[in-house]
Amino acid sequence: MKNPIQYIRQSLSRKLSLWIVFFAAVIFNVALGFMFTQSLRAVRQEAISRASKELDNTVLRVNSIIQLVETATDNTDWLITRHLDAPDSMFVYSRRILQNNPELNGCSIAFEPYYFQDKDRGRYFSAYTYNDNGNFYTSQEGNDHYEYFYMDWYQTAKLLDQPVWSEPFVDVNPEIHDSKEIIASYSKPIKDKDGTYIGTIATDISLSWLSETISAVKPYPNSYSMMIGQGGTFFVHPDPEKLFYQTIFTETLEHDDPAMADLGHAMLRGEEGMRELRMDGQDCYVFYKPLGDTGWSVAIVCPESDIFGGYKRLQQMVFFIVVIGLILMFLVFSRIVSYELKPLRRLADQAGTIAKGHFDQKLPDDDRSDEIGQLTHSFGDMQQSLMQYIDRLQSATAQKATIESELKIANTIQLNMLPRVFPPFPERGDIDLYASMAPAKDVGGDLFDFYLRDEKLFFCIGDVSGKGVPAAMVMAVTLSLLRHSSSHETDPAKVIQMVNETLCKGNDYDMFVTLLLGVLDLPTGRLRYCSAGHDAPLILHDGTISTLTCQPNLPLAILPEMRYKVQEYKLEPGSTLFLYTDGLTEAMNADHEQFGMDRVREQLSACMNDAPRQILERVQDGVHAFVQDAEQSDDLTMLAFRYTPGEFATILSEKITLSCDLKRVPELNAFIASVAQKLGADATVTGQLQLAVEEIVVNVMNYAYPEGKKGFVTIKVMSDGHQLRMVVIDSGVPFDPTLREKADTTLSAEERPIGGLGIFLVRELMDTINYERVDNRNILMMIKTIK
Amino acid sequence: MKRLFLLALFLVTAASTWAQERFVFTPQWTAQSQFAGYYVAQEKGFYRDAGIDVEIVHPTATMSAMKRISNNESQATTLQVCQAMEIIDGGIPLVNILQTSMNNAMVIVSRRGVDPLTQKGARVGIWSVGFGQLAICMSLKDGLDYEWIRFANNVNLFIKGAIDATLAMSYNEYYQLVQAGYEMNDLIVYRFCDHGYNVQEDGVYMTREYYEGHKEQARKFADASRRGWEWAAEHPEETLDIVMKYVKENKIVTNRTMQRLMLAEVLRLQIDRESGLREFRLRPDMVKMASDLMVEYMMLGNEVTYEQLTED
């Protein structure tokens, strides 16, 4: 059997029923306890009164027998006194008493020794009649062997001088072997007319008579009656061992029993009462009462088990019924509660099923209105809510998945916006560039870009505040703006300013962008740049790492009036410029430790002379090793390029300076022709060169100098035998012809803006052109491969 | 009316048909622990061992022990010393062949809760069969002037309140009174042995005539009886069983408790106060004292000497 407490605890119905049964038991106990205490008292009282009544009745009946004997004796008294002169009449009287009273056993009319001496009677004279089953025998009983005047029945009356009952005694009839009868005698002194004692009249009664009467008293099945004489001897007792042989004190002599001794004394004193004591090994109630003036005492012994037998049986029965009732109660209540709780159990089961994920589990369809019904309904509502919630969750999850997939597409688009082809300028030996972006999560806000225009490397790196779609959008916008703005402007500060103004206009979400934009003039290594709050790039050159000085400008999209200034730096050949976003320095490991500038420098110093791609990969590896499994918190974007301009080995260098007078244009043509000739160029190329230079120079002559101011223009031609470089230098107003829009050739010559068509032509004729303004001079270089 | 108070036996059979060898012993009273030693000797075969054929026959109402002795129906009986002296003084020479009692057992018990010695002229019960010689002497000597009421053989007169006091044997009536719920104390109980009347009681007697012809038989009976008593002293509970057997056979109205108390007291009385031993001898000083007292108070015509009582 399993642990009973466990067994009970497992079931609400058992627990509940047990409580009910427990309280019922308590109530029963109290009620029954009270009832039984009361009824015990009542039973006891009833027993006492019943036994007392029985005893009284018995004593009355015995007394009537005694009275009968006494009356019979008293009635003869006067006859004896009157006929003392006729001794033989005594025989008649004694016989008549017996004949008139068949209940009597015998009668002696006995006289003092020698009382009738004068009537020739001897020492003995006692007229005795006894009743032997209706036959009366009369005789003279005194003789030498039976000196009746020493007998108790004779002497007691004489000595006490009053009628008296003798102690019962055994009368042995020698004729009947082994017979023995217990006899009691009522003795009365006989006196002559002088009042002198002359003898005793005694009438006997068989105690069996009394005994039967007394023994018949049986208020309870095991109760019994007893009678003791004045010496305590049992004259009526159911136990033959005790009857006549023992006194009420006998057993107390060997086994101390004060209660019994006290009872004996009380009975001997002729008291009447009731006592509780142990007799024959059981608790008894003893009711006792004296028998008239005999000195005897009758008692009824009622075993307690008898008196309270019915009560005890009732008690046991009630106890049995209560126990059975409680058990039944428990079982019935268990069933009822169990039945009542069935929906709850079903609900519990179904809730369990629901808990396992079967949300469509049907709940018990119950129209109960009690707590269980309420619970079922509430549970049903909960289930409905849960299902709805789960539906919503599912659709939300689906939506999220859609969004995520769209974000992924956005991310791809975003990444696709960035240059992806590396190396980007494989045909060029002067620049080796590599860039990478590792988005943190979803779409990021980092950006980088680069392109070559007119021998100038445009590059930028930036970081949009925040993450996700808004950042990505801003990034895309920024990137587009940069492309657009830088397409006709080579000054990074101006480009940035333009971009800033545009971004500020639409910035309702307080986003901002840090950006660094640089323009490297490849022929000269002249780097012009502008930083809008972005981290300063690092310069790796000649075994040292230095930081490119950057003004602390505000990031973009904050202040539209912000004026950015360009900065310049001469990039030495062999230098590597390393640009990054804060995703690099702020990359965090699991201990929230940042990668930091020192580690960046440490990584860089180990690969200073490597190609940009290797440098970036190394730094990336370093970051991975540092961050390990920690989630990437920010985009990590890096861009590096190495500047290695090749030597231009001049084999030819010619120069001509002309005043700004159109009349000198033929000189220019001649000069070009002579140089072309020297280089061995054919006529077509010579014509192309002449046309391109003339276009530029005429333009300078016409517009470079203000009206009335005399100016010059110098033309330099250099060649390494493979490439031809023609440089037009003037000190006029700053003018960058490369920024002119490409000519709209659909317009007539008169409608086109000035210079527009010219520069278009130049671009067509030459491989590339490059404008620089150095020391207040406009320097335009035109390059063409001739062989 | 055939009334036999407590004497309830019917063993009287034709008495004179006994063979010569048969030795009939009749105790003075009905079967009780007072005679335990003889029952033991009979039951344990001590008499048989001694080579004598003993029969124990109790007295009846119509045939007292002394009557049986006189009729030569019994060869020996028990008597108190004072009784024996009276009989010898009456002309029947007796011989004490075994003395069992070494102390006097007689007491006076007062009913009134007072010292019997202060109850001058009181009605005092006395056995009708003739014990109590010493009490009569004492009553006279101490001037108590008791009125002697003779009773048959029980304490009913006393219990009924018909008498003021009663004589009692410390082994018999005394315990009957105790059984009747009577509470004893030193004040109401007068013990003769403590007041200069310590005269031995029970002994075994036979007529001198018979004795002279059967000395060897007498000696054997005495020795075996003594052996019986000694065994009884050592085995009181088994002795009690034997006593109860005789009690039942003789239909004596008594009980085991009573007999146990009696046996203990009888055995106690057999121990001499001075020597502390079970001596089984007649003490000449006690004989002399009893004889002198009884002569003085006219209960004996002549002195009965120790020599008259003893064997040679």
Image (tube, coloured by chain):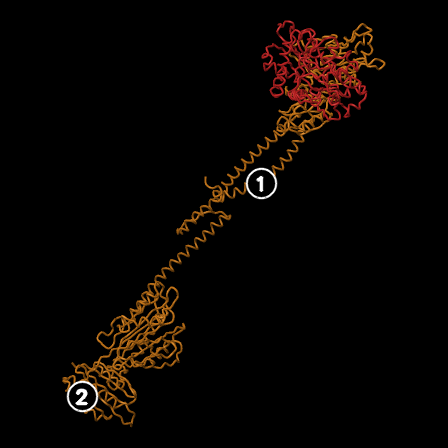
Chain colours: A orange, B red
Instruction: Inspect this view and state whether residue B84 appears.
Output: yes
- Nearest the viewer among A150 and A610 is A150
| Residue A478 percent location from the top left of the image | 34, 74
| Residue B311 percent location from the top left of the image | 68, 11
Indicate left or right for A264 with B42 as reference.
right
- Looking at the rendered structure, the kind of residue marked 1 is Val
Asked if both marks, 2 and 1, belong to the same chain, the answer given is yes
Quadrant where the N terminus of chain A is found in the figure: top left
Mark 2, residue position? A672
The residue under the point 25% across, 76% down is: A431
Foreground mark, 2 or 1? 1
Indicate left or right for A161 with B216 as reference.
right
- Looking at the rendered structure, the kind of residue marked 2 is Ile
Where residue A26 is drawn, which disc sits there?
1
Q: Chain of mark 1?
A: A
Above or below residue B289? Residue A481 is below
Q: Secondary structure at mark 1?
A: helix
Q: CA distance from mark 2 to mark 1?
A: 131 Å
Above or below residue A119? Residue A374 is below
Above or below residue A70? Residue A289 is below
